[in-house]
Amino acid sequence: MTGNKTDKKKKTIKTIRINVDKCNGCRACEVICSAFHAAPKYSSNNPARSRIRIIREPLRDLYVPVYAGEYTVAECAGRDKYTIDGKEYDECAFCRASCPSRDEFKEPDSGLPLKCDMCEGEEEPLCVKWCMHDALILEEREEEVDEAEEQEEQEEMEIGLEALTDKYGIEKIMDIVARMSEKDQNV
Ligand code: SF4
Ligand code: SF4
């Protein structure tokens, strides 16, 4: 394989399909996610650190799992209002982004953004494994990607990292990376 723009390679894309109707709001997914990402691993659990959060409306038997997505430096301009069964939800309620206008998907202590990493290193995402109600289903598909797209993704990651460094400072970022690698060594 060369650096030619037309080069293609196979990539396994993993996604988690959410079946809202099967979720009963037990929050086992939040517990295991936060425990898995604790330092040292499994030393504590705090749903505020989870990369999946459940929007809960127990009185109406409505539970919606939302995964942490990309970090964004700026608040978005166009926000959508959601109306479900006649109830209006906050414009940001189902948003996956860690963004400056709210505390969701941020580490409680440092304020650093959280993002679902599909439980890197695990065979199966733990929230999927721990969901006893089949509300979360892992799906895998093979996709052909070209190297130009991969390059673009890499550039996007670099822009994201640059934005984080601008916001939090290189020392804080280095500190969190050091903590993460320490966490891996403690496993
Ligand atoms: S573990 Fe499954 S059923 Fe329980 S809150 Fe999470 S998604 Fe819903
Ligand atoms: S896949 Fe892993 S990191 Fe992502 S929300 Fe589920 S438990 Fe958390």
Image (cartoon, grey):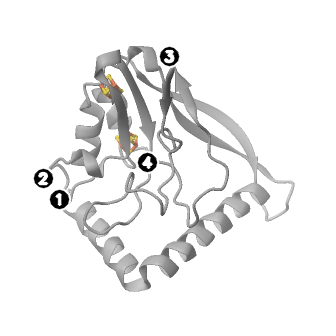
Residue 181 position within the rendered picture, expressed as x and y whole percent measured from the top left: 30, 68
Q: Which residue is mark 2?
A: 43
Q: Which mark is residue 85?
A: 3
Q: Secondary structure at mark 4?
A: loop
Q: Which residue is mark 4?
A: 116
Q: Is residue 81 above or below residue 2?
A: above
Q: Residue at x 62, y 31 (%)?
A: 141
Q: Which of disc 3 and disc 2 is earlier in sequence? A: 2
Residue 74 position within the rendered picture, expressed as x and y whole percent measured from the top left: 58, 65
Q: Residue at x 27, y 70 (%)?
A: 179
Amino acid type, residue under disc 1 in the picture: Pro
Q: Is residue 118 left or right of residue 74?
A: left
Q: Which mark is residue 155?
A: none
Verify CB contact (< 8 Å) between mark 2 and mark 4.
Answer: no
Tell which quarter ligand 1 is in.
Answer: top left
Q: Is residue 118 left or right of residue 46?
A: right
Quarter containing the N terminus: bottom right
Verify CB contact (< 8 Å) between mark 1 and mark 2.
Answer: yes
Amino acid type, residue under disc 3 in the picture: Asp
Residue 15 position within the rendered picture, expressed as x and y whole percent measured from the top left: 53, 35
Q: Nearer the viewer, mark 2 or mark 3?
A: 3
Q: CA distance from mark 4 to mark 3?
A: 29 Å
Q: Which of disc 1 and disc 3 is earlier in sequence? A: 1
- Residue 132 visible in this rendered orientation of the protein: no
Q: Secondary structure at mark 3?
A: loop
